[in-house]
Amino acid sequence: MADARWTQDGGSLVVEADNADFLPTLPDGAFTMIYLDPPFNTGRVQRRQQTSMVRSADGEGDRIGFKGRSYQTVKGTLASYDDAFDDYWSFLEPRLSEAWRLLADDGTLYLHLDYREVHYAKVLLDILFGRESFLNEIIWAYDYGARARNRWPAKHDNILVYVKNPKAYHFDNTEVDREPYMAPGLVTAEKAARGKLPTDVWWHTIVSPTGREKTGYPTQKPEGLLRRMVAASSRPGDWVLDFFAGSGTLGAVAARMDRRFVCVDQNPQAIDVMRKRLGNHATVIDAGESAVVGAGEAAALPAT
């Protein structure tokens, strides 16, 4: 049964909770868009490590920098989470069922996985949503990461797109950013200047290790991916949801695009990252304590 706090507020929230416990407190059909980036079931602990350089006073550092100055490399693990499940689908299936319940009639689900589980997810979502509700499989292709020598290196993720009602879903391609033509000489100058609408293959680099978006959270996804989804599948003022929120990329994009959002994660490290990243754009709630633990420090989201 939905909790009155959420139905009355309908604002932007960062929630520290086990999503299996928290999702049933949210109202039916409340969200126009749901983005899910669950653990990929890689079987290992995911870590993101930050490396910094500190000036060495005694000249015994391990690197030489500007004007021959000596620096020492300092490393520290910023964030981690366990990405191994004995039975992955007993974990994910009830959460996807909740996603179906929470979607508005014109709503869209984006499920972000990789080659390990996406085929099984497609079958499960066909059952939960109906095969007629399958809209797309988006391929996110990137240019960084694996360098396998005994097989083709994996350089893409899969994003399954399902709609609640295939006859009434919201999709506005006029709001989506356009891409350059790969062969601009084959189209008119006007079309080349305007660019083309994206297809179901999205070429986008990962979050730069030195870029402004970087939070230090493992598996952080670039804002450009989420911006495209939010633009196409929601309207200003709509409520959007991510209950494997991690670093809070959906929240950052939604706040900048005048959408309300709910970001849920049970990892305290993720909550700390989102508190800093989203600032006063969301109220932070510890659902286990059933109490508001305070909004983040006032901060403006950086322009991108």
Image (cartoon, rainbow, N blue to C red):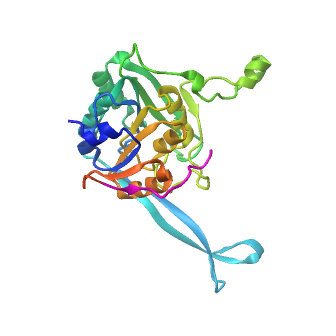
Residue 46: horizontal and vertical position, in percent? 41, 54
Task: From the image, give the main secondary structure of the stretch colored magenta.
Answer: loop
In this rendering, the answer to whether 184 lies above or below 147 is above
Along the viewing direction, whichever of 49 and 231 lies nearer the viewer: 231
Judged left or right of residue 52, residue 218 is left
Q: Is residue 35 visible?
A: no
Can you say which quadrant of the picture contains the N terminus? top left
Please name whichever residue, 69 or 30, is drawn nearer the observer in this view of the structure.
30
Coordinates of residue 3 in the picture (x, y in percent): 24, 40
Quadrant of the image containing the C terminus: top right
Asked whether residue 158 appears in the rendered view, the answer is yes
Range of residues picked out in magenta: 292-304
Q: Residue furthest bottom?
A: 58
The answer to whether residue 141 is magenta is no
Q: Quadrant of residue 192?
A: top right
Of residues 48 and 150, which is closer to you in this image? 48
Residue 302 drawn in magenta: yes
The x, y position of residue 194, in whole percent, is 71, 24
Q: Residue drawn at (44%, 31%), measured in percent from left and top?
A: 238
